[in-house]
Amino acid sequence: MKYCPSCQRVVEQDIERCPVCHKQLRRKIEDTDPVFLLETSILESERLEAAMEDEGIPFASRTPKKEPSATIITGNKNASINVYVPFHALERARDLAIGIGILNLEQKEETLSEDKSESASAEAVTTEDATQEMSRGKRLFVRIFSVILFILVVWGVVAGTDFVMNFIKGLW
């Protein structure tokens, strides 16, 4: 089994790239590596966290990057939370999630088969199609170009506003 330190997923098949984030898999998983358990609502994550504390299973809860922090601050209980556990406690945590009704057996099988099917589809993705990191020079060029483009847009807005204001002043 390989481990993706970027998205913290376990990849069971012997492939080169992570099926979720498409980063290169470089090492095997260790018992202390944090791994993704599930994504759930805040309300259900609180239930799961309480049960894991009772069972002595270490865990970490994080807001997904796609989830705006404002929903967490406002107390929206439907916002998503990702729950991570150490690899050595993954099976115990999955069984506990099934036991308290957050994860059912079908979902467990789906997540396991999803990992396998995603890894199989990742094999089909060629190196050209996979997400690649930009070189340092290319990244610098894109940043400089973006700054110049931003300055031109600001200049255009200011010049356009100035033209409109002078036109309006000329009417009176």
Image (cartoon, rainbow, N blue to C red):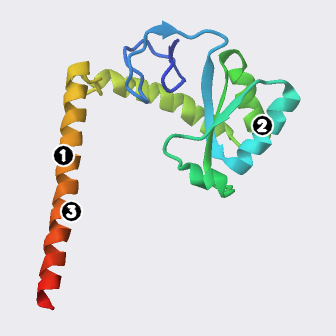
The furthest residue to the right: 54
Residue sitting at x 35%, y 25%: 122
Residue 107, image quadrant: top right
Q: In the image, which disc is placed on residue 49?
A: 2
Which mark, residue 158? 3
Query: Circle 1 sits in a helix, a strand or a loop, which is it?
Result: helix
Task: Kindly identify which residue carries mark 1.
Answer: 149
Residue sitting at 55 percent across and 36 percent down? 110
Q: Earlier in the sequence, mark 1 or mark 2?
A: 2
Is the C-beta separation of discs 3 and 2 under 8 Å? no
- Separation of marks 1 and 2 at Cα, in angstroms: 47 Å
Residue 156 spot, x, y in % from top left: 16, 59
User: Residue 128: x, y in percent?
Assistant: 20, 23
Q: Nearer the viewer, residue 89 or 61?
A: 61
Looking at the rendered structure, the secondary structure element under dot 3 is helix
The three-letter amino acid code for the residue at tag 2 is: Glu
Q: Nearer the viewer, residue 12 or 46?
A: 46
| Type of amino acid under label 3 | Val
Q: Decide which of tag 1 and tag 3 comes sooner along the chain.
A: 1
The answer to which of marks 3 and 2 sits earlier in the sequence is 2
Hey, what amino acid is under mark 1? Leu
Location of the C terminus by quadrant is: bottom left
Secondary structure category for the residue under label 2? helix
